Image (cartoon, rainbow, N blue to C red):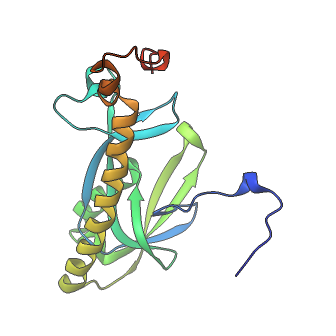
Amino acid sequence: MAELITNEQKEKQASSFLKIEDGSVITLKSNLVKTRTHFLREERSSVACIGEGCFFCQNGIPYRNEYFYWGTINGEKGLVRLPATVFFDLNESERMLKKDKQNFEWIISKSGSGLKTRYSVTRGSDVKVTEKEIEENNKKLLEKIEAYDKTMREKYDELSVEGKKEFFETEEEPPIEAYEER
């Protein structure tokens, strides 16, 4: 279906992630996948942390863990990226309830924005998730995470000095941008 757009600046690229809003009801229907990224404030972008030898780690930019599940947010299925505080709150609830976090709906309260965003978690209704369903969803999750990792690695290569090696390994004078600090 064609659609006339009169304000192109409001157009946004579709995200691979379901978005958590205040009052979102989430369910987790896979096992956890954890990744590491660096957030580059000047670039307003994240890049992969490659671990040992990581350019950004070596330059004092801390990494952050990201916590991913296949699940639902408000009934929509897809990739769920949990903020660290939500992940650890769910772990604490799981420990206290002595049941897997996948056995419940979780209601997320969100306040603030940007670096001042705060979350709280409330247990909702019981849900049933079978081992077979978790296995199937793990495959979907890993497929999406592979694509995400590839994108994050491409950004790492683009924004790290290591990604600029081609400029330094030629006999031509590299462009001035190659010398600028990021």
Tell me, yes or no, if residue 15 can be seen here. Answer: yes
> Which quadrant is home to the N terminus?
bottom right
With 71 as the anchor, is 132 left or right in this view? left
Task: Tally the numbered discs.
Answer: 0
Q: Which one is in front, 78 or 107? A: 78
Name the residue rendered at 47%, 55% in the picture.
Answer: 120
> Which quadrant is home to the C terminus?
top left
Give x and y (percent) for residue 137: 28, 76
With 43 as the anchor, is 3 left or right in this view? right
Q: Which one is in front, 158 or 99? A: 158
Where 97 sits versus 136, above or below? Answer: above
Q: Which residue lies furthest to the left in this view?
A: 52
Give x and y (percent) for residue 130: 22, 85
Where 62 sits versus 65, above or below? Answer: above
Image quadrant assignment for residue 53 = top left
Where 8 sits versus 99, above or below? Answer: above
Tell me, yes or no, if residue 38 can be seen here. Answer: no
Give x and y (percent) for residue 35: 27, 49
Name the residue rendered at 28%, 38% in the picture.
Answer: 49
Name the residue rendered at 24%, 73% in the picture.
Answer: 139
Name the residue rendered at 41%, 51% in the picture.
Answer: 83
Q: Residue furthest right?
A: 6
With 115 as the anchor, is 55 left or right in this view? left
